[in-house]
Image (spheres, rainbow, N blue to C red):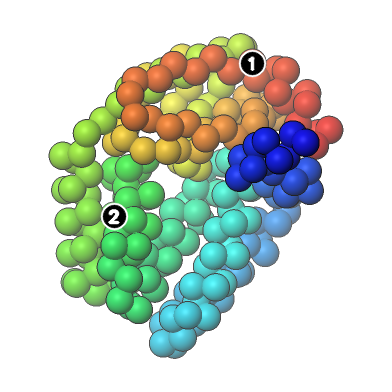
Amino acid sequence: VLAERLRDDAVEPRALLAAARPVSPAALDELQRLFEAGKGRFYAGQHEQALAQLKQALEGLERAPPTARTWQLLGAARVQQGLALLAIGKKEAGREAFRRVLRVDSGWSLDPDDYSPSTIAVFEATRVELKGAARAGLSVRSQPVGAEVFIDGAPAGKTPLSAALPKGTYGLTLTLGKQVSFTRAVKLDRDATLQVDLGFESRLSPQL
């Protein structure tokens, strides 16, 4: 009855657990190999196959424990996904992949030894576009304080945190030592304040 009332908002328990359960830290090496395989297919001209492997790598990386290493892999995979989308003519989708990186890490740059001038031009145009985009404030507090905040996988600082981000929806996770919060989707269409009970959420996480 409840599922009938919720309709599209209902989620099957197994699907919820699959999305919420984090990937093992040991799986990062496998995800990196998957990313490198997708990258290799892209440079071999196999763009559709590259996109399939990159999608699989991204799905795992988005559920991996948030760390600086995870972000470097995640950001690189999103950039590579953008390249593959541009290559098959999906220009807006490609730029959106670039936006996903630049909106949380405005300093991300492309090495001219690894990327063509045309790709770098699109990437830099996306950076300029985001600089002029409408923003909303995000304030994050936690108990205990001093938790590391990851926004879309990118390290953003420690709580209490105040940031101004281009409007949109972001994934937000907090960590402190071995404590990890749930990842929550935060829709920033106006200023928002979040209070996270990290101790409580980290105790529940293993039960998932």
**In this view, the mark in front (2 or 1):** 1
Query: In this figure, which residue is indicated by the disc labeled 1?
Result: 197
Q: Quadrant of residue 202?
A: top right
Is residue 110 visible in this depiction of the protein? no
For residue 8, side relative to residue 101 (left or right): right
Q: Circle 1: is it few (<14), some (14-19), or many (20+) Cα within 10 Å?
A: some
Judged from this view, the residue extending furthest toward the right is 207
At x 36%, y 38%, the residue is 168
Q: Earlier in the sequence, mark 2 or mark 1?
A: 2
The image quadrant where one finds the N terminus is top right
Image x and y of residue 66, in percent: 58, 40
* Helix, strand or loop status at disc 1: strand
How far is mark 2 from mark 1, CA to CA?
35 Å
Where 161 sits versus 119, above or below? above
Rendered view: 191 above or below 106: above
The quadrant the C terminus occupies is: top right
Amino acid at pointer 1:
Asp
User: Considering depth in this image, is 197 or 44 the residue closer to the camera?
Assistant: 197
Element type where label 2 sits in the image:
loop
Which residue occupies 51% across, 56% down? 73
Q: Disc 2 marks which residue?
A: 109
Q: Residue at x 44, y 81 (%)?
A: 47
17 vs 103, left or right, is right
Task: Indicate the quadrant where residue 56 lies.
Answer: bottom right
Residue 83, which numbered label? none
Any part of residue 140 in sight: yes
Q: Residue 26 appears at what percent x and percent y?
A: 73, 53
Q: Is residue 30 above or below residue 152?
A: below
| Closer to the camera in the image, 26 or 128 | 128
Rendered location of residue 148, percent (x, y): 53, 27
**Vertically, is 3 above or below 14?**
above
Looking at numbered disc 2 in the image, what kind of residue is underneath it?
Ser
